[in-house]
Image (cartoon, rainbow, N blue to C red):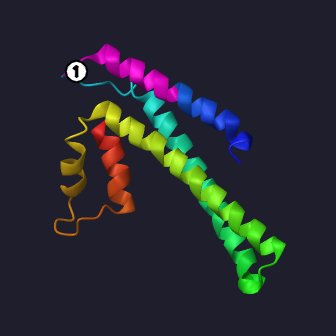
Amino acid sequence: MIKKRRMSFERAHGLLEEIRNLRAAMGAGVTPSPTMLHPLWLLQRLLVKEITRAERKIRRIKSILRLTAEHDGSDRSISLMTQVEVYRHLTYIWRSFGDAVAFLFMDKFALRQAFYNTHRAGSGKLHSQDKWNFCLTSA
């Protein structure tokens, strides 16, 4: 599956390199302009598209598995379970690109504090809207 997404990986890598170069050129304490953050917006849009695509494939394969007897041990069900694991690994890789963006803009020791200091005090968990807002405001 990774070979099929090669163009998207190359695009994400290029955008990440562009963001890294912009971050190095900005220096400390400089507020970036919206035009400087355009590659970041493109990368986030690409990551959202690719992660939702992979998760949609996982849901589709799991629905096929429910229709077939999952515990029968047939070659088809084993093949489908292997595909699910491949797509899960693919989503892990895409999420790692998002983690790289966070490490570009924040100190690695400040990430944990930022993770737990959310508007939903006491929950200790980030919800999807909080994650999206965190990505947009951390840049």
Task: From this view, report whether residue 119 is shown above or below residue 73.
Answer: above
Residue 88: quadrant of the picture: bottom right
Closer to the camera in the image, 125 or 83? 83
Main SS type for the magenta part?
helix
Locate residue 53, reporting x and y percent: 63, 55
Residue found at the very far top of the displayed protein: 25
Determine the residue positioned at 72% across, 40% down.
Answer: 3
Closer to the camera in the image, 68 or 12? 68
Amino acid, disc 1: Val
Q: Bounds of the magenta span?
A: 15-28
**Was residue 16 drawn as part of the magenta stretch in this picture?**
yes
Locate residue 125, reporting x and y percent: 28, 64
Task: From this view, report whether residue 48 is shown above or below residue 55.
Answer: above
Determine the residue positioned at 18% across, 55% down.
Answer: 117
Determine the residue positioned at 35% across, 44% down.
Answer: 135
**Was residue 22 drawn as part of the magenta stretch in this picture?**
yes
Q: Is 130 situated left or right of 3 in this image?
A: left
Q: Secondary structure at mark 1?
A: loop
Task: From this view, report whether residue 42 is shown above or below residue 28.
Answer: below
Locate residue 79, reporting x and y percent: 77, 66
